[in-house]
Amino acid sequence: MSFDRLAERVTEVRERVAAAVARGGRGQRVTIVAVTKTHGPEAVTAAWSAGLRDVGENKVQEALAKMADIAVPVSWHLVGHLQRNKVKSLDRFALLHSLDSARLANAVCDHGLARGRAVDALVQVNVAGEGTKGGYAPRDLPAEAERLAGLSGVRVCGVMVMAPLDAEEPVLRRVFETARDAREMLENAGHPAFELSMGMSSDFEIAVEEGATMIRLGTVLFGARPR
Ligand SMILES: *Cc1c(COP(=O)(O)O)cnc(C)c1O
């Protein structure tokens, strides 16, 4: 796949994002995280050339391999599940979007304490209760928010959610609204929870209308993923 027209697609996406911010009336800034999973390192270089500065991967190994192959200083985001025995690799990422369990939070905290700098992370919320997705159930969040306040090796910067694929618009809006409420709850519990990572290629405009500050885009930027 060639990424020749990526700059044009980025311009178009930015216009759609700006229109969605205007419709939503929240006036937030929105960071585009270019999800390069399954694409080669040239996708990362192309993203940088097209003006994008944030790149997301869902697997640690794949991300580390790409990092070794590129020369552009993008910020790396880990958007997929992290195994507890790989928390050291967080040193290579600017932000973990998928803090999805209390046990992972403990391991991430230990790593942050060991290195002397807290790990920036978003709490992943499994709003729709889908068994195939990780994340905290919304009802478990208030207690976990209190517990996380005592884990000084993790800095809870916000919330991440993945909406069910092919959901109808009212369902999407309810999922995003629940994420928004979760972010506010974390903030009220004393966390610096300013980010709301929600919205992918098929639903990012609705997510932005509902307050997304980070959208994670693969297909709409790079085309269908090679299998
Ligand atoms: C793959 C992936 C995306 C991007 O998906 P697209 O639909 O291609 O935009 C976003 N978030 C996560 C967690 C992903 O794994």
Image (cartoon, rainbow, N blue to C red):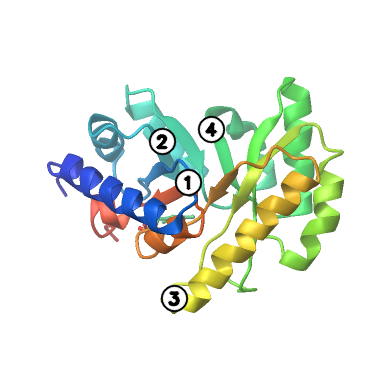
Q: Earlier in the sequence, mark 1 or mark 3?
A: 3
Q: Is residue 177 above or below residue 55?
A: below
Give amino acid for label 2: Asp
- Label 3: few (<14), some (14–19) or many (≥20) C-alpha neighbours in 10 Å: few
- Residue that numbered label 3 is attached to: 169
Q: Secondary structure at mark 3?
A: helix
| Mark 1 and mark 3 residues within 8 Å of each other at the beta carbon | no
Secondary structure under the numbered disc 2 in the rendered image = strand
Q: Are marks 2 and 4 in contact (CB under 8 Å)?
A: no
Report how far apart the C-alphas of labels 1 and 3 lie in the structure. Answer: 19 Å
Mark 2 near mark 3, Cβ–Cβ under 8 Å? no
> Which amino acid type is shown beneath numbered disc 4?
Phe
Residue that numbered label 1 is attached to:
214
Q: Is residue 147 left or right of residue 125?
A: right
Circle nearer the viewer, 2 or 4: 2
Q: Is residue 34 visible?
A: yes
For residue 74, side relative to residue 119 (left or right) = left
Q: Which residue is mark 4?
A: 93
Which sits earlier in the primary sequence, circle 3 or circle 4? 4
- Dot 1 and dot 2 residues touching (CB under 8 Å): yes
Kindly indicate the quadrant of the structure image that contains residue 47. top left
Camera-side mark, 1 or 2: 1
Tag 3 near tag 4, CB within 8 Å: no
- Residue depth check, mark 2 versus mark 3: number of the one nearer the observer: 3
Instruction: State the SS at label 1.
Output: strand
Residue sitting nearer the eye, 58 or 202: 202
Which residue lies at the image location 44% right of the left edge and 39% below the top edge? 63
Instruction: List x then y, in percent, for residue 12.
Output: 22, 49
Q: Which mark is residue 54?
A: 2
For the residues marked 2 and 3, what is the alpha-carbon distance in whole angstroms? 27 Å
